[in-house]
Image: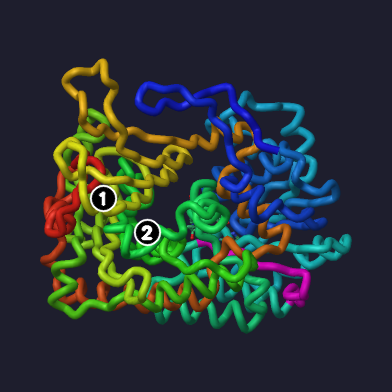
């Protein structure tokens, strides 16, 4: 059935009824969530920021949406001396600090929280795992999920201790949060330790960008509709730009961030995963390995640059004091927890090439940064201009664009050129840009779900398609390593930019060399 929505979108002043084709929704086209299994989910790091801001709210939302099987249990684990009652009260208090899209439903929370218990446990001490084992063995859940919402330094010890306690049975799954390692060697070490204990199909490596509705719909757009795929290649696409911009600085995470930087924190994982979703070949099916095989091929096709090219194609920056949303903010070097002589980058922009038949010669520009002019994440597919223009168009150089927006809202916009209205004399006869847009909140309303809810439901259902396989992660690290090594030799290449700007001027030059502007420069 095609839902018809009362709202309308405008095309050159004309009003059309908005109809959402079934095939555009990834959920309806591909994955209709399978029935979730009867589960026990254990959050290691149950009192942490990630747990109360993202994971517990996502489970609460899944519960509210009627998606959690009745018997399921949730266990929060940390070292605080709390009992379950105190933890539930603490969680309610924390939920009160969150912004909810709908009025908070107190009875619903009370019903949800009866499923939540707390276990005090030092995860670094293998002898503590007996109590966890006891809790798990109180019943036989179909799926037992260990979610590691703790620092990665604990991962190896946790895996060994789980194995020692016999908590790596076939019905058990482990979820790993970023950062998964600091470089190729440390990532390989963690993965080797995890894979000594669990099989690859029990391991769910989270990249929450893969759980976003727009990313799901990018798959649907490409592989559920016949319209775009014939154009999805070098003959019709001139460039691709992917941006993840933050207006915040490092906040309370200065000491963590200073050891990480934008390349490790955002590029190695999120940006390269988004690039894969745009560039991969159509998978043979929607099963996890078919999708992940195709992503892996993209990562293996990325051109590696020599050291001269690295200076030209990778721009690195660090913010200085400036204005953020109209208020003065300090520079990165004055942030708490940051070394005063730090050369850690808070911004990176890169030009990538994919060496295969589909994409040869098409530049992919990726960028991310903190303290930028605005918060937002988007993928822009720039199509080539028509081969023989017969109409005037603004600036003479406009072209079709597909904009997949991931933040702050999930939307997809198709930018077309249309004839200006005849009544508008100034524009008469000219082409003007217009956008067809699909706003998922408006389109799917209450049916739409947030990334962490989608990912947790996938974990409980045992579906791996939105999670990163070990070899993908390794290939991403392999590509990133020469950049890290180059930067270690050339710390002077880190450029200053003013907080509240769009990053170093060199990032504009990076695209301008090829006649392309970043979206905010158009
Ligand atoms: P956090 O606020 O510092 O929380 C860490 C949690 O781990 C706390 O519950 C802490 O509780 C527990 N913990 C630490 N050592 C423990 C031990 N030996 N035994 C038992 N529990 C222990 O950190 P976070 O922000 O939640 O982040 C957790 C991990 O997820 C980090 O690796 C982070 O990089 C990653 N991550 C976080 C976010 C986010 O939005 N916050 C997003 C993506 C990834 P006690 O100290 O009381 O034991």
How many numbered circles does the render carry? 2
From the viewer's perspective, is residue 86 above or below residue 419?
Answer: below
Nearest the viewer among 388 and 465 is 388
Residue drawn where x is 28% and y is 65% of the image? 362
The spot of residue 35 in percent (x, y) is: 79, 53
Callout 2: 10 Å neighbours few (<14), some, many (20+)? many
The residue range painted magenta reads 165-177
Residue at label 2?
266
Instruction: Describe residue 314's horizontal placement relative to residue 255 as left or right.
Output: left
Residue at label 1?
386
- Cα separation, mark 2 vs mark 1, equals 35 Å
- Please tell me in which quadrant of the rendered image residue 165 appears: bottom right
The spot of residue 117 in percent (x, y) is: 75, 49
In what quadrant of the picture does the C terminus appear?
top left
Instruction: Describe residue 85's horizontal placement relative to residue 377 as left or right.
Output: right
Callout 1: 10 Å neighbours few (<14), some, many (20+)? few
Does any portion of residue 513 appear in the rendered image?
yes
């Amino acid at each position: 059935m095609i839902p018809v929505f009362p709202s309308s979108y405008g095309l050159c002043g004309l009003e059309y009824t908005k109809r959402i084709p079934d095939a555009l929704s990834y959920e309806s086209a591909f994955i209709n969530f399978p029935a979730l299994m009867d589960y026990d989910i254990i959050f290691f790091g149950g009192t942490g920021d990630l747990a109360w801001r993202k994971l517990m709210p996502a489970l609460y939302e899944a519960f509210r949406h009627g998606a959690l099987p009745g018997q399921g249990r949730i266990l929060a684990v940390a070292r605080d001396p709390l009992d379950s009652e105190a933890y539930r009260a603490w969680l309610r208090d924390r939920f009160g600090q969150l912004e909810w899209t709908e009025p908070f439903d107190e009875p619903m929370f009370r019903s949800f929280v009866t499923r939540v218990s707390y276990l005090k446990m030092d995860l670094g001490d293998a002898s503590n795992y007996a109590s966890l084992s006891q809790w798990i063995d109180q019943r036989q859940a179909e799926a037992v999920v260990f979610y590691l919402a703790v620092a990665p330094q604990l991962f190896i010890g946790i895996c060994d201790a789980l194995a020692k306690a016999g908590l790596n049975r076939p019905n058990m799954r482990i979820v790993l949060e970023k950062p998964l390692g600091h470089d190729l060697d440390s990532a390989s070490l963690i993965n080797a330790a995890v894979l000594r204990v669990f099989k690859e199909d029990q391991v769910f490596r989270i990249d929450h960008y893969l759980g976003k509705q727009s990313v799901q719909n990018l798959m649907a757009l490409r592989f559920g509709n016949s319209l775009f795929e014939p154009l999805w290649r070098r003959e019709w696409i001139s460039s691709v730009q992917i941006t993840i911009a933050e207006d915040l600085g490092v906040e309370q995470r200065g000491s963590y961030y200073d050891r990480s930087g934008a390349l490790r924190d955002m590029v190695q994982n999120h940006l390269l995963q988004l690039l894969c979703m745009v560039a991969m070949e159509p998978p043979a099916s929607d099963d996890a390995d078919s999708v992940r095989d195709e992503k892996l091929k993209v990562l293996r096709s990325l051109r590696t640059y020599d050291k001269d090219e690295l200076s030209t194609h990778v721009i690195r920056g660090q913010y200085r004091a400036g204005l953020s949303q109209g208020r003065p903010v300090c520079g990165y070097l004055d942030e708490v927890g940051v070394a005063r002589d730090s050369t850690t980058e808070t911004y990176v922009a890169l030009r990538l090439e994919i060496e295969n038949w589909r994409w040869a010669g098409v530049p992919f520009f990726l960028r991310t940064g903190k303290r930028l002019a605005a918060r937002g994440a988007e993928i822009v597919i720039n199509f080539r201009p028509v081969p023989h223009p017969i109409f005037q168009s603004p600036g003479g150089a406009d072209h079709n664009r597909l904009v997949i927006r991931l933040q702050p809202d999930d939307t997809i916009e198709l930018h077309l050129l249309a004839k200006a209205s005849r009544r508008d004399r100034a524009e008469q006869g000219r082409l003007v840009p217009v956008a067809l847009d699909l706003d998922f909140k408006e389109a799917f309303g209450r049916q739409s779900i947030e990334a962490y809810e989608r990912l947790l439901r996938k974990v409980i259902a045992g579906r791996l398609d939105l999670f990163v396989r070990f070899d993908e992660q390794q290939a991403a690290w392999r590509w990133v390593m020469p950049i890290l090594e180059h930067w270690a030799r050339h710390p002077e290449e880190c450029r200053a930019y003013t907080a509240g700007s769009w990053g170093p001027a060199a990032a504009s030059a990076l695209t301008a060399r090829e006649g392309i502007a970043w979206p905010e420069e158009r």
